[in-house]
Image: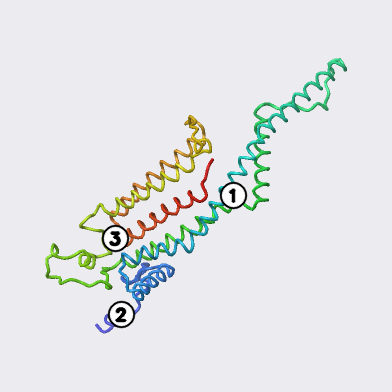
Amino acid sequence: MYALQAGSRCVSSRPHQRLRGAFVRPVNAVRTLSVFQEVTSSLVSLHEISGLPWLALVPLITFGLRTAFTLPLSVWQRKRIVKQQELRKVVQATTPVVKLRLAASTQANSKSAKAFEEEEGNVATTLQKPSLSPDQITLLALKETRSRQKKMFGESKVQLWKNALLPLVQIPLWVSVSMGLRELTKQRLVDSNLTHANPLQNIDSLDYVSRISSLDLSLPLDGLPILAPLLLGTLALLNVEHNGRVMTTTTSETMGIKLAPNPSSKVSQSMQSILNVSRLSCIFFMGVSSQAPLLLSAYWISSQLYSLVQNLLLDWLWPYQR
């Protein structure tokens, strides 16, 4: 009997011991990344120091982080994209010239070869250069255009690889704050910076502030479950449609000249595919937000609102035209 008790004490005192090939883990042992824990701790500290309610603090944090980290990169990227588009127009104008030069060179070589054959009595020569086909001329012209474009981009310091810097900063920032808020809302979260009403009081007699103070921010909004998904989906869809319209706007359209689009072109098909995937992601995002905590949905909504205002401001200051 004593041996059984001693064995049970030994097992209970060492929860990570292997029992018959199995690994016993404590119930409360949950792996979490320290980065997300630091984000959660920072959010709690800001909430305690500022004294602001969560539904006001989270949008302010969103605007502050986006202004400090992503707005300078967005301005830099928009200026760079506009410069790239200006240089691309110059480079694309050289493609027909290169094609004409290659075609003229091929025609001159063929004429000289015929003249040589007539003089030598149709004797084959190994020094004759093979003539270029139209497909080969097009391919060589594209290679020349790309090499000139790369050279011009390098001279102007607007290389294409710099366009990846903004997503490399924006995506980790969005994921870190989202996961930090997700860690914060794993338990019941009621705003402590608001005055709480009497729990025995009828909810219909409460004012607006008292109703907000009684909300559990770790759960979706039960009173209006469609409100957060509707706001988030509307803002996300506005961003997608606005960016799609900007990317397809040409210089002639801004001057009042409407051109018939070519839906069968590769550029048009690629753009439509990207827009369709973005629209479907907005619908998926709405479904996720319907089950997400209210505080996390508030962060997503404020982030989409900031993106919309930022895009409108950038289009007004540095318009993009194809």
- State the residue in front, 171 or 79: 79
| Viewer-nearest of discs 2 and 3 | 3
Alpha-carbon span between mark 2 and mark 3: 48 Å
Q: CA distance from mark 2 to mark 1?
A: 66 Å
Decide: few, some or many residues near mark 2? Use Cα within 10 Å; few <14, some 14-19, many ≥20: few
| Element type at mark 2 | helix
Which mark's residue is nearer the viewer, 2 or 1? 1
The quarter of the rendered structure image containing the N terminus is bottom left
Percent across and percent down for residue 180 are 38, 66
Do tag 2 and tag 1 residues touch (Cβ < 8 Å)? Answer: no
* Left or right: 54 as drawn, with respect to 173: left
The quarter holding residue 221 reads bottom left
Q: Is residue 16 or residue 267 the one in the foreground?
A: 267
Question: Mark 1 belongs to which amino acid?
Answer: Leu
- Secondary structure at badge 1 equals helix
Residue 250 bears which disc, if any?
none
In the image, taking residue 234 as reference, residue 93 lies left or right, namely right
What is the total number of numbered labels drawn onto the structure image? 3
> Which residue is denoted by mark 1 in the rendering?
160
Which residue is under mark 2? 7
Q: Amino acid at mark 2?
A: Gly
Residue bearing the label numbered 3: 294
Q: Residue at x 65, y 41 (%)?
A: 146
Of 229 and 313, nearer the camera is: 313
Residue 271 vertical position relative to residue 81 in the rendered view, above or below: above
Residue farthest to the right?
A: 120
Instruction: Determine whether label 2 and label 3 are within 8 Å by CB.
Output: no
Q: Mark 2 or mark 3: which comes first in sequence? A: 2
Q: Secondary structure at mark 3?
A: helix
